[in-house]
Amino acid sequence: MEEIAEGLIKLILRSLGFLVRALIFLIYELWFEIIAWYVGWPICRIITFGYYPKVRITEHELASLWCNIVVSIIGFSSLLGLAILLVPWE
């Protein structure tokens, strides 16, 4: 009986671990690679007068890793800064 309960607990914990990993991946994929790219791309283009990034906004899969990271960090930082500015301070 203990072996069945132990097996059931392991199954539940493995399923929960898989669910958490899947959620983390989806959050990373959605926020950092897609939303942050689409926010950071025009900001980078404005700051560099249309020079960087050289790929189009819809071609983030073709951008280099360095380009992807920089543009996404700028986009994420911009969203974070906007959220801080919009929070009502008391």
Image: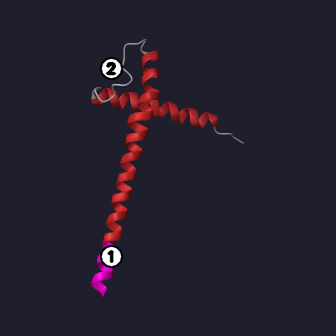
Depth check, mark 1 against mark 2: the one in front is: 1
State the SS at label 2.
Answer: loop
What is the crowding at mark 1: few (fewer than 14 residues within 10 Å), some, or many (at least 20)? few
Residue extending furthest top?
Answer: 49
Residue extending furthest right?
Answer: 90
Answer with the quarter of the image where residue 66 lies.
top left
User: Which three-letter amino acid code belongs to the residue tagged 2?
Assistant: Val
> What's the residue at 38%, 36% (across, down)?
33
Dominant SS in magenta: helix
Answer with the quarter of the image where residue 21 lies.
bottom left
Where residue 88 appears, x then y in whole percent? 68, 39
> What's the residue at 35%, 70% (across, down)?
12
State the SS at label 1.
Answer: helix
What is the crowding at mark 2: few (fewer than 14 residues within 10 Å), some, or many (at least 20)? some
Q: Kindly report the distance in space between the C-alpha atoms of the residues bearing marks 1 and 2.
A: 50 Å
> What's the residue at 47%, 22% (across, down)?
43
Q: Which mark is residue 8?
A: 1
Q: Is residue 48 above or below residue 21?
A: above
User: Which three-letter amino acid code belongs to the residue tagged 1?
Assistant: Leu
Of label 1 and label 2, which has the lower sequence position?
A: 1
Quarter of the image that includes the N terminus: bottom left
Where residue 72 appears, x then y in whole percent? 40, 31
Examine the structure image and report whether residue 3 is included in the region drawn in magenta. yes
Q: Which mark is residue 55?
A: 2
Where residue 90 appears, x then y in whole percent? 72, 42
Examine the structure image and report whether residue 17 is included in the region drawn in magenta. no
Residue extending furthest bottom?
Answer: 1
- Bounds of the magenta segment: 1-10
Task: Out of 68 and 14, give the one closest to the viewer.
Answer: 14
Q: Is residue 32 above or below residue 54?
A: below
